[in-house]
Image (cartoon, grey):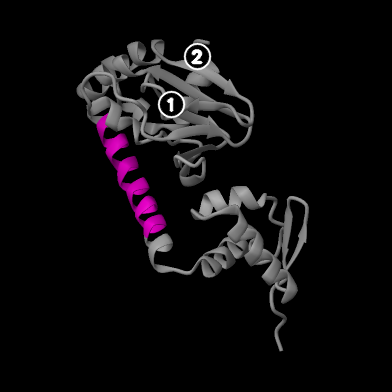
Amino acid sequence: MMLDERTVFDFKMAFPFANELGDLEELFFSRLYLQKLDNGTVLLDESRECTGVIFVLSGSIRIYKISDEGREITLYRISRGETCVLTVACLMGTGNIPFPVAASAEQKSEVVFMPVEQFRQFFYKSGSIQKFLFSSMSAKFYSILGLVENITFRRTSDRLMDYIISKSAGGTYPVYATHESIASDLGTAREVISRLLKDMESKGIVSLNRGKIIYNPPKNV
C-alpha cells in the first residue's frame, strides 16, 4: 500500500536522510510501499533474487544464514530506522543476484519497501542515501566481525552465559527463548545449548521452564 501522510512523517522521523532529498523527495516517497508483517513472515531467502530494499518502521527483522544441513546462524537484526545493508550487494551487482541471506520478521513489524531498480536510481543521485547506507554498512560490519570473533575465539559456554545475562538484564527479567533460537543466535547446535543449560541448571545458575530461562545471579557474600 502507498504511504499516507502519517507514514511519510514517521519515515522521516526514523530515517533522517529522507529530509535531505531535496528535489527528489516527492518522487522518492511515491515509489515506497508499506508492508505489515506477522511474526514469522519470511521477507527474503537465498533462493530468491534481490527484488527490493526494506526500511523498518517498527518491529524486528532477523537476518540469518542457513547451512546445507538446515542449521541457522543469526548475523544481525534490524529494527526501527535500519535497513538490511546486504542489499547493497544487490544494488552494486550486475544482472540478477540471489539474496545472500534470509530475512524474517521476529514479531509484528511494519516495513517500507522500494523495488531495487528504482532504489538504485535514487542511490546514485542522492548523497544523503549513500551516506546512510555506508554508515549502516560500517555498523553491521563490526557487528558481524564481533560474531565471527566470538565463535572463533570464545567458548560456547562463556558466550551463552553472556547471552543470558544480557537478555535477562542481569537476572531482572526471564529470558523467553527456545534452545533452537539461542543456538541460532550463538552459531552452534541446539543440542549443545540444551546440554550447557542443563549443566547450568544443575549448578543453580539458571532455572529452566518451557520456553523460559530464569537467571539466578550469585548473591553477594
The numbered dot on residue 3 is 2
Relative to 141, is 219 on the left or the right? right
Q: Main secondary structure of the magenta part?
A: helix
Relative to 84, is 109 on the left or the right? right
Residue 42: x, y in percent?
54, 27
Mark 1 nearby-residue class (10 Å; few <14, some 14–19, many ≥20): many
The magenta stretch is 129-148
* Residue type at numbered disc 1: Ile
Is 102 one of the magenta-colored residues? no
| Quadrant location of the C terminus in the rendered image | bottom right
Give the total of numbered labels. Answer: 2
Relative to 125, is 3 on the left or the right? right
Q: Quadrant of residue 26?
A: top left
Note whether 79 is above or below 186 in the view shown: above
Residue 37: x, y in percent?
59, 24
Nearer to the camera, 110 or 9? 110
**Residue at the limit of the structure toward the right, as seen here:** 209
Note whether 134 is above or below 174 in the view shown: above
Q: Quadrant of residue 207?
A: bottom right
List the residue tagged with mark 1: 54
Q: Residue at x 39, y 52 (%)?
A: 143
Residue 114: x, y in percent?
40, 18
Tell me if label 2 and label 1 are in contact, CB under 8 Å. Answer: no
Kind of element beneath mark 2: loop
Mark 2 nearby-residue class (10 Å; few <14, some 14–19, many ≥20): some
* Residue type at numbered disc 2: Leu
Residue 130: x, y in percent?
25, 32
Of discs 2 and 1, which sits in the foreground?
1
Is 143 one of the magenta-colored residues? yes
Kind of element beneath mark 1: strand
Q: Residue at x 43, y 60 (%)?
A: 151
